[in-house]
């Protein structure tokens, strides 16, 4: 690490950031212990981190290979999924009925999008970058637009993954339920896009690490990997992230938007837990199970260590801070810490519930400081309402 | 002649476009030209299309059925797609908001049936008469179709019967028959001791709205429902009244209807007709409190009324003060609602008075005509739904 940094600093300035970025990527993959996991994430990693396929300014084509599972007998095969389907039908809402008439002024300090301490400006000053009041507001606006843009990109992934999973899953009740999730995700794309497009007017490109996760599970043919990736990892992390903004924003339209989305997402993660618990317990060999366990661990680390708003860094500080200074700033700022904390509060108990926290992996989570979330409640024990009251 | 392509061009053709983009990405990165971190976005057309009106509180209703009443009038049956009943009183109207050529036009249309008669139950029927050169009325007459979704505000208005009058006299011209029909159905069904007189003026037989329905009502309630048609261009052998509903013809017709006892008058139709009827009734000694009127005019917004730029407006509503900016292209109501002030309103087109506020300071222009009376104007009342501030204003809502 130190060696890399010194090496990077010898390069001409404009090349420096690019090469530092590649070293970081190489580091991620160098640390992966299981060759199968490396094989599963590696190609997506090259496409996302090196070639930056998500940022090329044109639509991305991802080959998707999985089996569509038809059943001409229409069995009633899973009561819990059937009940989720019923709840989902009743929980439908119309994106148009959010209070869109509200004028959002991202620079109004009286109605902040995110709180003032979201990013630690004292630390920024200690790196030699001083922002005046107006600039601080602009930076927070950028960060909000960045987070919401990543939510939106994640929702696009969720929309397609939900459709794929609906085809691939073997429970018929799961397929029925899945159809509602496709609608839900479409609505989430609608409302996040509309908020970004008409209220913030700023759409960030997809974060490279988020791209890697989406690419790797879209192209993986195994349905339970898609499930694990989308329903548990991306949705679980998103649920936490939505919650932080929901709790902290003073902007009424955004709050209302997130309140509605969170209720849907709670169902989605619940479904993921129900579907995978049985699959992992009864239908996989130990070798297959532990591969998924490792995969989940690597993705959790990827999101914890690398989901660092580098797009905002590129925009604001590429010439003023090094990437590692930015990383330090983001990982120690109160708002961002809260952000990551809540992400894992939701995720870790779900991994436990589906059987991906065996004694084999626990020491690794321990070292990553993530075991303190182990005893929380998993999604199948939580309703959307409880999730929201938890946040107050 | 075979044109020679440079080798590099030919080589490019062999490499998939994706690989070329990949290579460019890597090289650009090394050259210090990273991809742009974000795009600036404007209102994309998709978001625009799903944003039907500028005001909150509208609901999307579906056209369940269309009935052609006359060559120039169509009835639309509107239902709530979620199955909720549409609740209103006979005589009230709904505001239909349509986006035509990029502009949102809001027009009032009265329910032409009471709730009890609505088919299917929970729906509302509105009847739209084509106005020459009229944008909304033409559009609905020519292009509305079953399945269309229309944004609707309301119900609004106080053109409703209170209590059970001994005699109810309904005087209407043209499309003015619409709310009167709903009132007639309702009064005949609910007040067994009330006598209903329906005097309706049209140009020719082909223009008469609800002719069959009115005839059926008369048949169902002999002795309690007196129906009288007046035509300005009558056919041969016409048994009804003849002429325009001016003061003289109206007086003659009322004489012939042998009205006895106290009566409540409900008048609705074109402006000149209404003025004439009022003059006639006052001349016959009818007290103004017994004459109820509904004017069918929509306010006209002309560019000349557009003030130059953004003007500050302070609105005192529900014990709190809200200061908002009245944007040049918006009404005071539109600006204030968008900026979070809980303003009162209902019809959004100057027809009901729900948005009435007192202008304490400043100046405002209003589209005309509207439902404010001369009295209200002299007391400094304004309608925010059709008002635009020309100078900084302070407005006060009435304590509710
Ligand atoms: C409270 C209320 C209830 C109403 N209920 C009904 C109803 O039940 N059925 C119905 O058909 N209409 C009703 N109207 C009238 C309706 O709201 C519209 O004004 C009418 O349809 C014309 O709109 P437009 O867009 O077609 O015409 P516009 O494009 O607004 O106007 C075009 C031209 O027509 C003139 N014009 C506008 N309105 C009228 C009119 N009523 N008669 C003659 N000329 C006019 C205008 O001055 C202008 O020159 C009601 C109006 C009010 C205020
Ligand atoms: S809202 Fe009806 S008059 Fe303004
Ligand atoms: Fe979603
Ligand atoms: Fe979801």
Image: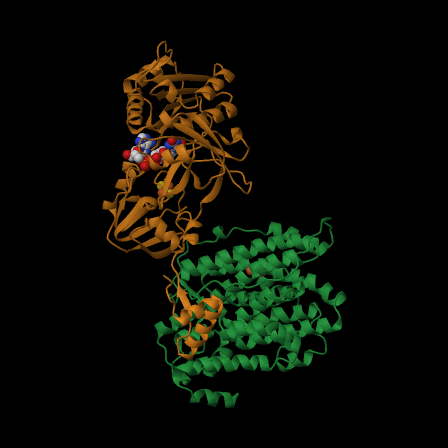
Chain colours: A green, B orange
Q: How many labels, in total?
A: 0
Q: Is residue B117 left or right of residue A17?
A: right
Quarter-wise, where is residue B181 in the image? Answer: top left
**Residue at image coords 54%, 67%:** A241
Q: Is residue A92 above or below residue B282?
A: below
Q: In the displayed image of the protein, which residue is found farthest to the front?
A: B1
**Residue at image coords 40%, 18%:** B261
Q: In the displayed image of the protein, which residue is found farthest to the top?
A: B237
**B280 or B389: nearer the viewer:** B389
**Residue at image coords 68%, 78%:** A362
- Residue B202, given in percent of the width and then of the height, sits at 35, 21
Whether residue B145 is visible to the viewer of this picture, yes or no, is yes
**Quadrant containing ligand 1:** top left
**Residue at image coords 44%, 27%:** B68
Q: Is residue B136 above or below residue A229?
A: above
**B71 or B128: nearer the viewer:** B71
- Residue B54, given in percent of the width and then of the height, sits at 39, 49
Q: Is residue A343 left or right of residue B377?
A: right
Quadrant showing the N terminus of chain B: bottom left
- Residue A178, given in percent of the width and then of the height, sits at 63, 55
Q: Is residue B391 above or below residue B158?
A: below
Q: Is residue A55 above or below residue B332?
A: below
Quarter-wise, where is residue A119 in the image? Answer: bottom left
Whether residue B354 is visible to the viewer of this picture, yes or no, is no
- Residue B185, given in percent of the width and then of the height, sits at 48, 25
């Amino acid at each position: 690490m130190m060696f890399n940094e010194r090496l990077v600093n010898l390069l001409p300035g404009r090349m420096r950031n690019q090469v530092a970025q590649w070293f970081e990527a190489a580091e991620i993959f160098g640390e992966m212990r299981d060759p199968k996991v490396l094989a599963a994430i590696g190609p997506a990693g090259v496409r996302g981190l090196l070639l930056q396929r998500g940022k090329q300014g044109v639509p991305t084509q991802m080959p998707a290979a999985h089996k569509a599972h038809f059943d001409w007998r229409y069995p009633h095969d899973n009561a819990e999924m059937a009940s989720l389907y019923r709840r989902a039908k009743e929980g439908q809402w119309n994106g148009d009925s959010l209070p869109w008439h509200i004028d959002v002024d991202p620079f109004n300090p009286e109605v902040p999008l995110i709180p003032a301490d979201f990013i630690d400006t004292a630390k920024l000053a200690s790196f030699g970058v001083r922002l005046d009041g107006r600039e601080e507001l602009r930076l927070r606006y950028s960060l909000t637009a960045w987070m919401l843009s990543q939510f939106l990109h994640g929702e696009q992934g969720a929309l397609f993954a939900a459709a794929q999973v609906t085809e691939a899953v073997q429970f018929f009740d799961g397929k029925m339920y899945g159809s509602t999730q496709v609608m839900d995700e479409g609505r989430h794309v609608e409302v996040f896009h509309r908020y970004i497009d008409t209220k913030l007017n700023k759409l960030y490109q997809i974060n490279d690490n988020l791209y890697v996760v989406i690419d790797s599970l879209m192209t993986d043919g195994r349905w339970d990997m898609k499930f694990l990736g989308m329903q548990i990892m991306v949705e679980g992390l998103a649920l936490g992230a939505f919650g932080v903004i929901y709790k902290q924003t003073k902007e009424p339209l955004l709050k209302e938007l997130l309140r509605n989305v969170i209720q849907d997402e709670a169902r989605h993660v619940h479904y993921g837990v129900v579907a995978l618990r049985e699959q992992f317990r009864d239908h996989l060999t130990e070798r297959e199970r532990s591969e998924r366990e490792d995969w989940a661990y690597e993705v959790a680390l990827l999101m914890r260590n690398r989901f660092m708003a580098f797009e905002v860094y590129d925009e604001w500080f590429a010439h003023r801070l090094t990437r590692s200074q930015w990383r330090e700033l983001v990982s120690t700022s109160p708002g961002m810490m809260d952000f990551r904390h809540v992400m894992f509060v939701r995720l870790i108990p779900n991994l436990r519930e589906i059987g991906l926290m065996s004694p084999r992996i626990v020491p690794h989570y321990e070292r990553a400081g993530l075991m303190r979330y182990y005893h929380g409640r998993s999604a199948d024990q939580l309703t959307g309402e409880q999730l929201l009251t938890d946040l107050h | 002649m075979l044109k020679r392509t440079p080798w590099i061009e030919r080589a490019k053709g062999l490499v998939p476009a994706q690989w070329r983009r990949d290579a460019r990405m890597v090289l650009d990165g090394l050259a210090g030209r990273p991809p742009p971190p974000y795009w600036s976005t404007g209102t994309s057309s998709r978001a625009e299309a799903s944003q039907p009106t500028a005001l909150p509180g509208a609901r999307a209703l579906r056209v369940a059925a269309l009935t052609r009443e006359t060559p120039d009038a169509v009835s639309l049956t509107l239902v709530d797609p979620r199955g909720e009943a549409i609740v209103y009183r006979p005589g009230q109207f709904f505001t239909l908001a349509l986006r035509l050529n990029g502009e949102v036009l809001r027009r009032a249309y009265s329910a032409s049936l009471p709730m009890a008669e609505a088919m299917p139950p929970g729906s509302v029927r509105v009847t739209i008469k084509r106005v020459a050169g009229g944008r909304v009325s033409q559009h609905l007459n020519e292009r509305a179709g079953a399945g269309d979704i229309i944004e609707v505000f309301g119900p609004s208005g106080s053109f409703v019967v209170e209590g059970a009058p001994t005699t109810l006299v309904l005087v209407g011209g043209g499309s003015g028959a619409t709310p009167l029909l709903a009132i007639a159905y309702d009064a005949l069904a609910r007040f067994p001791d009330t006598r209903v007189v329906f005097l309706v003026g049209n140009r020719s037989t082909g223009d008469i709205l609800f002719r069959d329905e009115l005839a059926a009502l008369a048949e169902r309630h002999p002795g309690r429902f007196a129906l009288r048609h007046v035509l300005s261009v009558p056919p041969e052998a016409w048994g009804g009244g003849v002429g325009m509903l001016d003061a003289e013809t109206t007086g003659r017709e009322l004489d012939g209807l042998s009205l006895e006892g106290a009566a409540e008058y409900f008048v609705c139709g074109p402006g000149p007709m209404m003025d004439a009827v009022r003059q006639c009734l006052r001349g016959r000694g009818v007290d103004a409190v017994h004459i109820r009127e509904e004017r069918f005019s929509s306010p006209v917004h002309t560019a000349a009324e557009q003030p130059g730029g953004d003007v500050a407006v302070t609105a005192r509503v529900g014990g709190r003060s809200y200061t908002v900016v009245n944007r040049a292209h918006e009404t005071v109501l539109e600006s204030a609602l968008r900026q979070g002030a809980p303003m009162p309103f209902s019809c959004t087109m100057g027809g009901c008075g729900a948005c009435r506020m007192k202008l304490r300071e400043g100046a405002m222009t209003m589209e005309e005509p509207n439902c404010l009376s001369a009295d209200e104007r002299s007391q400094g009342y304004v309608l925010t739904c059709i008002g635009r501030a020309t100078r900084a204003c302070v407005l006060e809502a009435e304590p509710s």
